[in-house]
Image (spheres, rainbow, N blue to C red):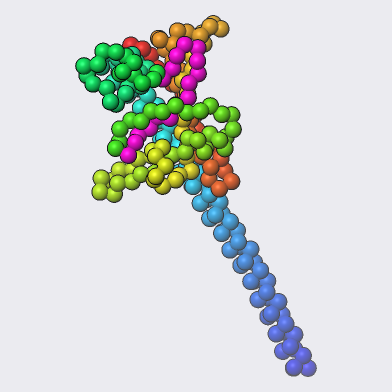
Amino acid sequence: MLYLMMLKKKWFTLIEMMIVIAVFSVGVLAVLRMVLYNMSVMDGIETKTTATFLAKESMDLVYSLRDSNRLAWLPWNCVVNRAYQETDVDLDMVCRDYLFSWNMDSFWQIGFDPEEIISVSKADFTSSFDKKLEDNALYLLSWEQLGSIVYTYDTQWSPTIFARYVVFTGVVENGKILPMDRIVKVESHVLYRRWLTTGDVVLESFIWNY
């Protein structure tokens, strides 16, 4: 009789241990799931924040280009030829291109080159997200000695998950497009793909010819 009672107590102990282990496992899995979810949320916030800063950067560069052109008495949408001389008076020598023209949407890559000089080049329009991400990809250049990080279109540097392009369009008022020599709408797009998540951060503004 004593043996049966001890055996019965032993089985109860094993069952109790199994229940405790099961409850503990469920609790641990719930905590791990919450931790992983929070990490995913924080990673998403960091990615969107970086994308927003990159979009703001190109918008600031557009205004900087406009202001630099006006100070140099050049057309406000001029893409300056770096090889031009101050003595050149022919605009075809000074301006290698123009950021926009009448009634024409234009797409550009505007950023920094490895020498931290503003670089401007045309971007091809495509409706495909993957193609935009590939054609306008940004690469990371870091100078530890300078303590600065630069995103560039130069493919020799480290690839990132981001791509960026800028769109210039006409401003529509009362069904008509306003003269683009006065005001232009600017859209700065930053695309990204992080694992299975994709996004497109867009900042919009207007730029005036003052």
Foreground: 26 or 94?
Answer: 94
Which quarter of the rendering shows the N terminus? bottom right
Residue located farthest toward the left when viewing the structure as drawn: 87
Is residue 149 on the magenta stretch? no
Q: Is residue 29 left or right of residue 105?
A: right
Q: Residue at x 41, y 47 (%)?
A: 158
Foreground: 107 or 45?
Answer: 107
User: How many numbered marks does the figure carry?
Assistant: 0
Image position, residue 14 (x, y; %) = 69, 80
Image position, residue 43 (x, y; %) = 49, 47
Q: Residue at x 41, y 28 (%)?
A: 121
Q: Is residue 22 left or right of residue 168?
A: right
Which quarter of the rendering shows the C terminus? top left
Q: Tell me which corner region of the image, top left, top right, bottom left or bottom right, holds residue 98.
A: top left
Q: Tell me which corner region of the image, top left, top right, bottom left or bottom right, holds residue 87.
A: top left
Q: Residue at x 25, y 45 (%)?
A: 146
Q: Residue at x 72, y 82 (%)?
A: 11
Question: Could you tell me if residue 188 is visible in this image?
Answer: no
Image position, residue 119 (x, y; %) = 36, 30
Classify 86 as above or below 164.
above
Q: Which residues are magenta?
A: 99-114
Question: Could you tell me if residue 68 is visible in this image?
Answer: yes
Q: Is residue 95 left or right of residue 180?
A: left
Foreground: 133 or 83?
Answer: 83
Is residue 109 on the magenta stretch? yes
Image position, residue 6 (x, y; %) = 72, 89
Classify 123 as above or below 194.
above
Q: Is residue 82 left or right of residue 151?
A: left
